Amino acid sequence: MNQIKWPFLFLALAAVVCLMGTGIAVSYRSPIGIILTLVAFIFVMGFGFKTKKKMRESGKL
């Protein structure tokens, strides 16, 4: 069994929290909350993909 990649686990949990926040913002009908949580989600996902690419290029993945 492979080892857990902790940074990726935390990034995945952060992305899930952002999507949950989007659902909460939708339920409160808050356009600002929706936009902020979606921007945060895009930032977290982009950071995760960037980190994965960096680790793959350095041979750590």
Image (tube, helix red, strand yellow):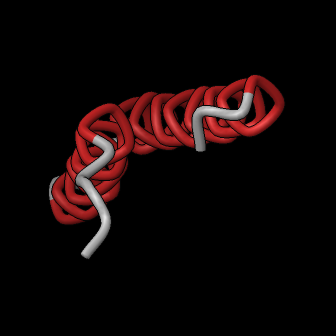
On-image quarter of the N terminus: bottom left
Drawn side of residue 23 relative to residue 56, left or right:
left
Q: Which residue lies furthest to the bottom in this view?
A: 1
Foreground of the two, 43 or 29: 43
Image point (62%, 27%), residue name: 51
Foreground of the two, 14 or 30: 14
Percent position of residue 52, x then y: 64, 38
On-image quarter of the C terminus: top right
Drawn side of residue 29 relative to residue 56, left or right:
left
Drawn side of residue 60 relative to residue 32, left or right:
right
Image point (49%, 32%), residue name: 44
Image point (16%, 56%), residue name: 24
How many callouts does the rendering have?
0
Picture quadrant of residue 33: top left
Image point (24%, 38%), residue name: 6
